[in-house]
Image (cartoon, rainbow, N blue to C red):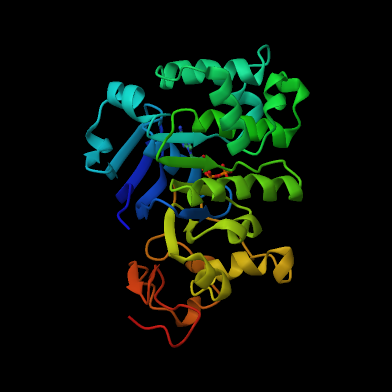
Amino acid sequence: MTAVLGVRGLSVRFRLRDAVVRAVTDVSFDLEPGRLLALVGESGCGKSVLAAALLGLLPGNAEVRGRVLLGAEDLSAAGERTLARRVRGRRIALVPQSAATALTPVRTARSQLAETLRELRPDVRDLDAEADRLAERAGLRPADLDRYPHELSGGMAQRVVLALALAGDPEVILADEPTNGLDRPLVERTVDALRGLADDGRAVLLITHDLAAAERVATDVAVMYASRIVEQGPADEVFADPWHPYTRGLLDATPARGFRPLPGHPPDLSALPAGCVFRPRCPRRDTCTDDPAPRRVAGRVLACAHPVEKEVSC
Ligand SMILES: Nc1ncnc2c1ncn2[C@@H]1O[C@H](COP(=O)(O)OP(=O)(O)OP(=O)(O)O)[C@@H](O)[C@H]1O
């Protein structure tokens, strides 16, 4: 399947008065129609900055390198006008972290959805019927749209935001921590709804630190650590048999796999160590050659000189 969105060597750094924060370093991946890529990693590793970079939504102190290809179009060369008029909402939609702040408190969900539809798809004649259809697609009852945001539960508000993201009929959906603050059944409903959108033929990027949620719905997984993707591959293979010691550490820390927390902390992104950024926390650091250059290994991309499985070789 051809990628609808291709990310090639993307790096983002923020220039501060007395420091440079390397938030995203040399990241590459493809999003394909019908597939859901989960981007996982601890808080602060650069996941949200990466999503913002894909949409050209970074603040003025950001320096971006690399390319973002939407079909044949190079978004890295597109100006703000193109992104605003032709891309955001229409071809790539963002489901933001906080539904509460994304919704206007004084208007019903239906009126907000109708306004978004009018703007993104002026050809739609029956706004109510289309709003009902989008609500159902996002896992809501149409009657829920007639509520004000304060009358919605957290899970319902999140699904309203999902319906808003669908209004422009985008090919790509970026969901940035869409399950924050939700209890387990609602987490599962929300990620299942995202999986349904991938099954409909959209390309979905799910950004999350909830590995159980990622494992439930992802077709592919990319594991991010300190601004880099350290392991990437088919989700069932990576979750069943993680090769990067960081991936293994993340999984071992989940309740389902023994709750053994990963020792240490991620590095400060303004003072990244040379060589392997995971080395200070790595259980194999004493026998490692410290060469983290990413390489393709049996269907995965791995940035580790000394992966967990001994039989893995280049
Ligand atoms: N405008 C900015 N200027 C300087 N540093 C920034 C800016 N925006 C983000 N950062 C830094 O970039 C790094 C990555 O942040 P990001 O929000 O992408 O992490 P994350 O993995 O999404 O974490 P979380 O799950 O907590 O949202 C952090 O160190 C953050 O402080």
Whether residue 265 is visible here, answered yes or no, is: no
User: Which residue does the image show at 69% across and 63% down from the upper left?
Assistant: 254
Residue most extreme to the top: 106
Figure quadrant of residue 133: top right
Q: Looking at this view, is 37 or 115 the one in front? A: 115
Image position of 172 (left or right of 113): left
Image position of 49 (left or right of 247): left
User: Which residue does the image show at 71% across and 26% down from the upper left?
Assistant: 144
Figure quadrant of residue 277: bottom left
**How far from the left and from the top, in percent, is residue 103?**
62, 22
User: Which residue does the image show at 48% across and 68% down from the upper left?
Assistant: 279
**How far from the left and from the top, in percent, is residue 153?**
76, 31
Count of marks overlaid on the render = 0
User: Where does the C terminus fall, quadrant-wise?
Assistant: bottom left
* Residue 8 higher or lower than 259, as above or below: above
**How far from the left and from the top, in percent, is residue 1?**
32, 58
Whether residue 299 is visible here, answered yes or no, is: yes
Image position of 184 (left or right of 236): right
Q: Looking at this view, is 258 or 306 the one in front? A: 258
* Residue 250 higher or lower than 120, as above or below: below
Residue most extreme to the bottom: 311
**How far from the left and from the top, in percent, is residue 297?**
36, 75
